[in-house]
Amino acid sequence: CGQCVSVCPTGALYARNDLEKLYEALSNGKVVIGMIAPAVRVALAEEFGIEKDPFIAERLVSFLKFSGFFKVFDVAFGADLVAFEEAHELLERLSNDERLPLFTSCCPAWVKYVEQFYPTLTNNLSSVKSPQQALGSVVKRIYARKLNLDPERICLVSFMPCTAKKFEAEREEHVGIVDLVLTTKELSQFIKASRIDLRKLEPQPFDRPYGVSSQGGLDFGKSGGVLSSVITVLNDEIGIEDERIFELEKGIRQIEAKTKDGRTIRGLMVFGLANARKVVNDILEAKMNVDVVEVMACNFGCVGGGGQPYPNDTQARQSRSKQLKELVAVKSLISPTENYHMRKLYEEVPNLHELIHTTYRPRKRIVQEDVEVLPASNGEKV
Ligand code: SF4
């Protein structure tokens, strides 16, 4: 997750390269479908020296199609879906006054950190799957049926800025959804090995129906993007009169949104697990009163993920955040609620809610050779 290996809570920071598995899938008759995360495009643009290219994602689509991909979708579509669901989940928890604050669950490093270090708070995690797993579930369970494709024939490949996403796809509750997770570094190797000049490829749009996304969905690639997108949905649903963001300290920002019905929703946008620990401890000691907390394990969010190319320092992360902000600004759809294909999916799939929600549970923490056993929220040993 971009943090030092010795403190990484995911155990996912090992140099596993899965590129060979992609070559295998492309050559053995699999129907290979790709999906590209928001933060991947900006880091790849930087890697190939084309930072100012507004069509970088569409050139990537071209490259993947040329390489044998059947369809290429945008993970930002999955992010729209997640923001929409999470906004409704927050409203429900606020009206029932339960499981607050709501913790976002898009970042698998943060989810695993809560499961291992704060097992009594696993119920506070949003039950909405991450954009990778939500979109993956829709592709494997809905899209495959629509196209009369056996899901076993599909190899669903997700391009991520993140090493922890490999771990996420292998969690027992997600097995069989995303078949292969390749980092930005692995995608870069794939492009370089092909000897195709990315800059010279004609841009092609993402495939429909899961290739359309809003500013909110694309913004998931940097810290603060999830919560801003949730607030945008809340604005559409209940009306937000005023919204203020304060920087409390580096990596911790507070957002206050006043709703038209007179409520104030307080949220925090946090990056870095040390900051997250501080915030959670303050919440547990009642020093802080918030309704929703977005946590991203990597500094500046996914733009600084452990699967991004080097240098992956503060300067590179800030520059990627700026580039992503520029790409976000020119998107014509502002809110996830404006995403026509997402709305249509809700109309067509009555059990969509079931498909894109999951559950979490306390996890064992491995301390050197010994396994420390933590008590679950119900007091049982797990
Ligand atoms: Fe992965 Fe993003 Fe979390 Fe980093 S912040 S671990 S890149 S999901």
Image (cartoon, helix red, strand yellow):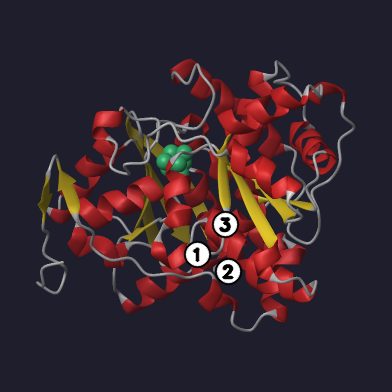
The residue that mark 3 highlights is: 178
Q: Is mark 1 within 8 Å of ligand 1?
A: no
Quadrant in the picture for the C terminus: bottom left
CB atoms of marks 2 and 1 within 8 Å: yes
Give the spatial CA distance, label 2 vs label 1: 9 Å
Q: Kindly identify the amino acid type of the residue bearing the numbered disc 3.
A: Val
- Identify the residue at horizontal 72%, vertical 28% (top origin): 191
- Identify the residue at horizontal 52%, vertical 29% (top origin): 308
Q: Kindly identify the amino acid type of the residue bearing the numbered disc 2.
A: Glu
Closer to the observer: label 2 or label 3?
3
Determine which of the numbered discs, if any, sits on residue 87 in the image. Answer: 1
Give the spatial CA distance, label 2 vs label 3: 32 Å
Q: Position of residue 332 (x, y in %)?
A: 77, 47
Q: Secondary structure at mark 1?
A: helix
Mark with earlier residue (1, 3):
1
Quadrant of ligand 1: it is top left
Q: Kindly identify the amino acid type of the residue bearing the numbered disc 1.
A: Ala
Q: Position of residue 274 (x, y in %)?
A: 25, 35
- Residue 292 lies left or right of residue 82; in this view the side is left
Q: Residues within 10 Å of mark 3 (few under 14, many from 20)?
A: many
- Identify the residue at horizontal 73%, vertical 58% (top origin): 210
Task: Please indicate, yes or no, whether residue 114 appears anywhere in the rendered image.
Answer: yes
Residue at the right extreme, as displayed: 202
